[in-house]
Amino acid sequence: MAIKRLVMKFGGTSVGSGERIRGVAEIVKAHRARETVVVVSAMSTVTNQLVDVAQEAINGITEEDIKDFARRLKEKHARAIRVAVAREHQGPPLQEVERLSTELEKVLVGISYVGELTPRSMDYVLSFGERMSAPILSGALKSQGIESSWFSGYEAGIVTDSSFGKANPLWAKTNRKIKRVLGRRTERGEVPVVTGFVAGDEKGRITTLSRGGSDFSAAIIGSALKADEIWIWTDVDGVYTTDPRMVKQARTIDVISFAEAMELAYFGARVLHPKTIEPAMEKDIPVRVRNTFKPEHRGTLIVREQKKIKEIVKAVTVLDDCALLTISGVGMIGVPGVAARVFTALAAEKVNIMMISQGSSEVNISLVVEKGDLNRAIRTIKKTFPGKDIVKDVTYDKDIAVIAVIGAGMRGTKGVAARVFRAAADAGVNVLMIAQGSSEVNISFVVAAKDAKKGVVALHKEFIAE
Ligand code: ADP
Ligand code: ASP
Ligand code: MG
């Protein structure tokens, strides 16, 4: 079946230089469908540099340093323009990059004067990466004879709540606006280039979708436009059986289900932002992960269901940006609703709970939360249970990692858990906590951070490849 409507997203390394941006434009030209939208990340390393400079701005860097930073960023992008964009199309992106670098300089000087970096101003600073790369790719497309203009995520229609740093789309508004803004252009045969990661709240203030969020931007747009497919172009051959940088035996997966891919992304496989799959799954839009540096490779296809499942375990992941929190007290025994109160209070404070386990003795409840949420979680629990009658202690461990073993083939296969924990034990990995989701698509467990790699290697070897 020919693809009529396609959303393609290109990650940071894929647009890491002028040469690469030119290569991306060629890929778009070769693969475009009748209606195509392109989503683009910041050039590689730029977002990290923006994080650093924003933090330095409140730690006393000089105005000179800020000017210097903005100038270097402008030059990096101007160089890319000169390589990727034909001379007759260089004007608009060059002017935009110039304008943005002046704006960035003012924002950073402002932050340094106030001496305070709020999540809102952080998002403003971070947005410059994508806002500078999008005009370049759009110009590169024009140079290939493709009609194109660029949009920020907000201009394209992504309206979010005001959770700066990890904003969520307001779906009804977003869907409507995207169709209006982008739909009209793609129908005319234009290829709009949209900044990934960057959106705006209802007041038009810049928000971001959390780090790595360009994948999510592509899924939001694909879902609003009811695309036939969403393609995530990145720097590896597809979704691997485990992080290829950590385990050299990792292999690409040909086909994987939405449910499996969702678990994989949620439990640390950086190749997909955790929120990418849900919108695609809801509209039943296949997602493909492909390599910009090897466009001939077919990559990984993510679909609703896989017809024949051979493998019991498809992938092993590790999540390390998390902490283990243990709430204990004999007072919890027999008091109904303690767990419910804990979860309600944490949900109200927007603490993301990754795993839960409660022993049958009820003396303690263990939770895994994102590291960034840990202090807020502790404060909330102490406030919810003042005194020592019910909850006596709240302890935590930041040096942990979660290993997840994922595969729809585990469903109904006996003895998988036993094999998982025997393999971990044989590798000398001590298991601190276990959780199995009710979907049976994953078994996840907590280990000491120092044991994480050893555990992943052992499990990959046990189930996937020597
Ligand atoms: P992009 O900039 O294209 O969004 P990312 O760096 O965010 O790329 O994601 C791609 C990287 O994810 C790969 O280079 C790889 O190191 C890492 N990765 C971690 N786990 C996996 C996995 N299971 N499959 C593929 N890549 C993975
Ligand atoms: N540029 C953003 C980041 O580095 C978003 C992305 O690349 O997906 O987090
Ligand atoms: Mg990414």
Image: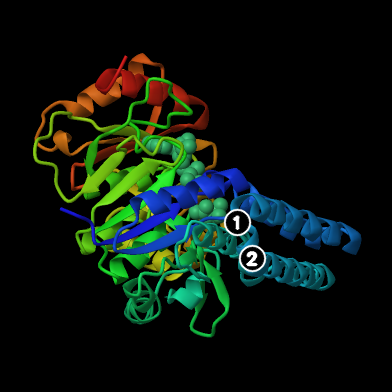
* Callout 1 amino acid: Val
Residue 388 in view (yes/no): no
Displayed quadrant of residue 426: top left
Residue 48 in view (yes/no): yes
Q: Are marks 1 and 2 in contact (CB under 8 Å)?
A: yes
Label 2 element class? helix
Position in image of residue 220 (x %, y %):
36, 66
* First-in-chain label (1 vs 2): 1
As displayed, is residue 461 above or below residue 158? above
Q: Is mark 1 within 8 Å of ligand 2?
A: no
Label 1 element class? loop
Q: Residue at x 33, y 26 (%)?
A: 251
Q: Is 44 on the left-hand or right-hand side of 179?
A: right
Decide which of 65, 120 is in the foreground and name it: 65
As displayed, is residue 20 above or below residue 196? above
Q: Is 213 on the left-hand or right-hand side of 229?
A: right
As displayed, is residue 439 above or below residue 37? above
Decide which of 321, 15 is in the foreground and name it: 15
Q: Residue at x 57, y 79 (%)?
A: 205
Q: Quadrant of the C terminus?
A: top left
Instruction: Quickly name the residue at label 2.
Output: 93
Q: Which mark is residue 158?
A: none
Instruction: Quickly name the residue at label 1.
Output: 85
C-alpha gap between disc 1 and disc 2: 9 Å
